[in-house]
Image (cartoon, rainbow, N blue to C red):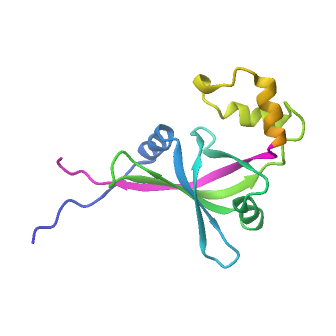
Amino acid sequence: MTQGPAPRTLSDDALSDLLGRQQFGTLATNKRSGHPHLTTMLYGWDPDARIVRFSTTADRVKVKHLRRDPRAALHVPGGDVWSFAVAEGEAEVSGITTVPGDAVGRELLAMIPEAAKPEDEDAFLEQLVAERRVVIRLKVGRLYGTALDVDG
């Protein structure tokens, strides 16, 4: 039996590029039992600050997990089943946006790509308050991942 090619470790730049190309990943937080809690999340990657940002509501279980234990990881698939990136670090949860246009609301608004910005910014900021939105900021301490080069 012939062994196929081994996975190749991706460089920090390649991992950062992969995080920047994707929009969705699986966020892993830690339950009180020690088991992982996994949830698919829309995210924004800030490569200069090495922070992954997520928008969620204050009542979500992942928020409770992160307030108790800030260790978290984001798994992001690559362009094929053989490649991925993982961003590991400690997360912080912002306060709840309570006044339309406050700092948290502005941070949430800034996470939206320019092409998808809401037409009525004031209504959007009011909606964020009504939904009790927060920002999860995953401060990335470690990036890792691989790719497997195979001929199609």
Compare residues 76 and 11 and report the one nearer the observer: 76
Indicate left or right for 106 with 144 as reference: right
Q: Find residue 131 and report its horizontal and vertical position in percent.
A: 79, 44
141 drawn magenta: yes
- The residue under the point 52% across, 41% down is 23
Is residue 108 visible from the viewing direction of this image? yes
Specify the principal SS of the magenta part.
strand
Is residue 104 visible from the viewing direction of this image? no
Q: Find residue 142 and report its horizontal and vertical position in percent.
A: 54, 56
- The residue under the point 45% across, 40% down is 17
Q: Quadrant of residue 87?
A: bottom right
Indicate left or right for 81 with 54 as reference: left
In this view, the residue farthest toward the bottom is 33
Q: Find residue 98 and report its horizontal and vertical position in percent.
A: 89, 41
In this view, the residue farthest toward the top is 119
66 drawn magenta: no
What span is in magenta?
131-152
Q: Quadrant of residue 8?
A: bottom left
Is residue 141 depicted above or below 121 in this figure?
Answer: below
Indicate left or right for 60 with 41 as reference: right
Quadrant housing the N terminus: bottom left
- The residue under the point 69% across, 60% down is 62
Is residue 140 depicted above or below 102 in this figure?
Answer: below
Q: Quadrant of residue 113?
A: top right
In this view, the residue farthest toward the right is 99
Compare residues 39 and 28 and report the one nearer the observer: 39
- The residue under the point 28% across, 54% down is 148
Q: Find residue 138 and report its horizontal and vertical position in percent.
A: 65, 52
